[in-house]
Image (cartoon, helix red, strand yellow):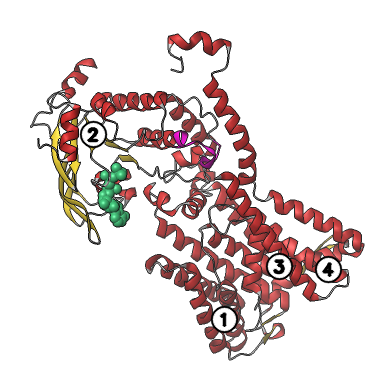
Amino acid sequence: MSTPPSGTVATAASAPDPATEFLARQSRLGRARSVLHRHPAVSPAVVLVAAIAVFGTINERLLLPANLSLILQQVAVVGTVALAQTLIILTAGIDLSIGAAMVLASMVIATTASELGVPGALALLLGLLVGLATGALNGVLVTRLKLPPFIVTLGTFNVFVALTLLYSGGATVRGADMPGLLTLTGAPITIGDVRITIGVLIMFALYVVVGYALTRTAWGRHVYAVGDDKEAARLAGIKVNRVLLSVYLAAGAIAAVCAWIQIGRTNAASPNAGVDLNLDSITAVVIGGTSLFGGRGTVWGTLLGALIVGVFRGGLSLAGLDVLYQTLAVGILVIAAVSIDQWIRKVRN
Amino acid sequence: MTSTTEATAERPLPTTPPILEARDLVKTFGRVVGLDGVSVQVYPGEVLAVIGDNGAGKSTLIKCLTGAEIPDSGELRLEGKRVHFRGPQDARAHGIETVYQTLAVSPALDVASNLFLGRERRRRGLLGSVLRSLDARGMRADAEAELRKLGISTLQDVSVAVENLSGGQRQAVAVARAAAFGSKVVILDEPTAALGVRESNQVLELIKDLRHRGLPVVLISHNMPQVFEVADRIHIQRLGRCAATVTPQTHSMTDAVAIMTGAATA
Ligand SMILES: Nc1ncnc2c1ncn2[C@@H]1O[C@H](COP(=O)(O)OP(=O)(O)OP(=O)(O)O)[C@@H](O)[C@H]1O
Ligand SMILES: [Mg+2]
């Protein structure tokens, strides 16, 4: 099968074929690039370790278990929204409404439970349906009307905010007025010195599930293929619209779970919660090395991105700096991360 | 084996029904008429070449055969039965495999993932059926075997992302995908455009090999010597219409080019 034509046998045996050599050299360069491509989480991992080292030296209180678990709790909500955001961005979309969808779900859960006396489990199920409905609305608008996700979710963001105020009457529901199940996500589990809330554990579990689906299942490959080159995916026989719809539905479901985490974290459900949540989730995704052009990135990068933001905020405040410097630092991080992504793309082309 | 090849090299008997047939396809893009009533038949075990100038409608024609474009009017028959392809996945499900001019590979995915894109294989047992886990190792091994069959020795690592491959290697991936999964018809839109001499010859050998297996091949090419080397019949597309269908036995390259450019009629 692989026997070369008889005339070239002698040369092929004595010296490597120049063509083979050329291709081998090319793929060695390519291999270095594909390491970055295949492991986009490498650079955020380096940044996170460096940030912990730097802020830990400035103020070693940062590394206290109590402090680290506080950072984790602060990261849980934005980290979960960012997981949903990662799915959308992998398809070369962006979701401006996911934070508002989360707040809408949290108000539905809290209000139905406290005012209508619906049992906690049923209220959560209702919240899940609301989350799925928000995803379905976005997904249908993106796939059927072929509108850009940016515009669609800008519209639905306003719709969800209005619905939230309409449904809740603008009132905050206190944790004490809800069934215990709803605030369970704020309950801590103590392992040695480390206190981790159930909400944090749920976030990690969601990352494992979505990470598995993205890397080990056909659906995951289709998500990457659609984000990478929609037309190529279509010609390869992938039902692009179905994949996109499933991604928006998954994002909506994750937003609903996040609503539960949020209620536990703040021990309340407030219609005004999470104003910055949406931009923060995009920040985490971008810092985590996921490309805004789609098709490249991992959920683990996003988790690292969310942790980086958490460590920066925690570290800077421990260093006694004003909140405005935290915000400034995050802004610089975002621009640096996007520049790195652009640079990688330029090298590849 | 040789005798069958000999037989199919001659003009197909009128009694042999075509495997794939299109009648009076019309496809317009706004005011541009891509196809203006084109009919084409693909017979078992033949290589049908489609030639024509740039913009003559060759790619549009084959896209209408593969569900990548939906014709405005006209009908498609596969083994005599009327079919309606709503998308490329429908044509694939019917055993029609295509290498598109744009290759349709996903740059960020690796070679093996691209070969199996859209028809991934799951693992056996509960891991596959319940957790939907992919048989990544098995697919990699099969991808390697397919590429080896094509004689593409320069492409050994199937876990390399396609974006790191040269143009010719990408084309090889697309050709290997079509050859591996085509069971009724294999359609190749300029499959040798980015290939060197040696790789081009390998693709030509592959085309002959497919014909040998009884699989009809539709080949779009601008390379006349290649077309005249492998084609049994040549469909000449001109300005959105079929100007003529000729054979290498009855027409010379100069004749074909003359028809293609409108300097002569069949
Ligand atoms: N998606 C599209 N939108 C608009 N016009 C199109 C589209 N696809 C093809 N056309 C037009 O239809 C005509 C036929 O195009 P087609 O791609 O089939 O030509 P071709 O014979 O394959 O040319 P080439 O040899 O350059 O590949 C051209 O005029 C082209 O501009
Ligand atoms: Mg073409």
Image quarter in which the N terminus of chain A is found: top left
Residue at 25% across / 25% down in the picture? B230
Lower position in the chain sequence, tag 3 or tag 4: 4
Queried whether the magenta region covers residue A24, the answer comes back as no
- Do labels 1 and 2 touch, CB within 8 Å? no
Q: Is mark 2 within 8 Å of ligand 1?
A: no
Task: Kindly indicate whether the residues beneath marks 4 and 1 are on one polypeptide chain.
Answer: yes
Residue bearing mark 4: A316
Q: Which residues are magenta?
A: B159-170
- Tell me how far mark 4 sits from mark 1, CA to CA: 36 Å
Lower position in the chain sequence, tag 4 or tag 1: 1
The chain containing the residue under callout 4 comes to A
B176 relative position to B125: left or right: left
- Tell me how far mark 2 sits from mark 4, CA to CA: 69 Å
Residue bearing mark 2: B49
Which mark identifies residue A331? 3
Percent x, y of residue A205: 65, 59
Q: Nearer the viewer, mark 3 or mark 4?
A: 3
Residue bearing mark 1: A108
Find numbered disc 4 in the image and state the secondary structure of the residue it sits on. Answer: helix
Residue A318, picture quadrant: bottom right
Crowdedness near tag 4: few (<14), some (14–19) or many (≥20) residues, C-alpha within 10 Å: many
Task: Kindly indicate whether the residues beneath marks 1 and 2 are on one polypeptide chain.
Answer: no
Q: How many numbered marks have been drawn onto this rendered protein structure? A: 4
Percent x, y of residue B117: 44, 44
Crowdedness near tag 1: few (<14), some (14–19) or many (≥20) residues, C-alpha within 10 Å: many
Q: Amino acid at mark 2?
A: Ala
